[in-house]
Image: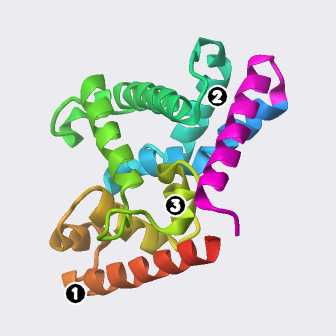
Amino acid sequence: MRPDSTLETTDEKGIEGLLARARRGEAEPMGELLQTYRNYLTILATIQLDRKLRRRLNPSDLVQETMLAAHQDFAKFRGSSEPELLAWLRQVLINCLHHAFETHLRAKKRDVRREVSIDEIGAAMDRSAAGLAHLLVDRGGSPSACLRQRERAVAVADQLARLEPDYREVIVLRNLRGLPFEEIARRMERSAGAVRMLWLRAIDRFKQVCHVAE
């Protein structure tokens, strides 16, 4: 296996190469770039929506809308690196989320405790992205090998996407939204004890997935 630094450099050059080709108007690299971050955007969208909201706003639909907007507005992107691209894609997702809240929920304010401003969505998205990037960092402060190979938050999202839906949801609720087990149990319609066991199995499974990806 190549050293981690080599893996990071190779991956970074790959992303920069796709960005350069996309700037020249090539459709294939643009599509490849957006598909690379589909899991990342889906996890971020899912974190922002509880189960009640997800009955009206499907994270996959929001991500599809985000990718379409990103494709149409790519000429406005001025960055040249993966971190800059991720920040821009998060902003596009924030705008789509805010538009969805305004469009789909305004008529049903009785179901929403308060209106959500675009600044609040942005702050929540930043917290989610930071939490995603630091998920499962070991006690010594270094990420597992599979997460050092590229932008950590993107790698985590790709591994989460490989989990069973219940495993993915309990990790999102516990590790990324920081909810207590009692609240997670209410949302998942299980007992608190069952949720604790589900979470432990989910974390073990996630570690296995990361290990296989090394």
Q: Nearer the viewer, mark 3 or mark 2?
A: 3
Circle 2: element type: helix
Q: Find residue 45 and report its horizontal and vertical position in percent.
A: 44, 44
Q: Residue furthest top?
A: 76
The range drawn in magenta is: 1-27
Give the quadrant of residue 57.
Answer: top left
Q: Amino acid at mark 2?
A: Leu
Give how far across and how far down residue 195 sits, in percent. 28, 80
- Of marks 3 and 1, the one in the foreground: 3
Residue corresponding to mark 2: 68
Element type where label 3 sits in the image? helix
Q: Residue at x 80, y 17 (%)?
A: 24
Give the number of callouts: 3
What whole-number distance in Å separates the C-alpha atoms at marks 1 and 2? Answer: 42 Å
Which amino acid is tagged 3? Leu
Q: Earlier in the sequence, mark 3 or mark 1?
A: 3
Q: Report the residue at 26% width, 82% height from top.
A: 196
Residue 56 vertical placement versus 95 (above, below): below
Q: CA distance from mark 3 to mark 2?
A: 28 Å
Res 109 seen here: yes
| Mark identifier at residue 147 | 3
Q: Amino acid at mark 1?
A: Gly
* x and y, in percent, of residue 97 in the image: 41, 32
How does the figure colour the protein chain or chains? rainbow
Residue 197 placement (x, y as % from top left): 31, 87
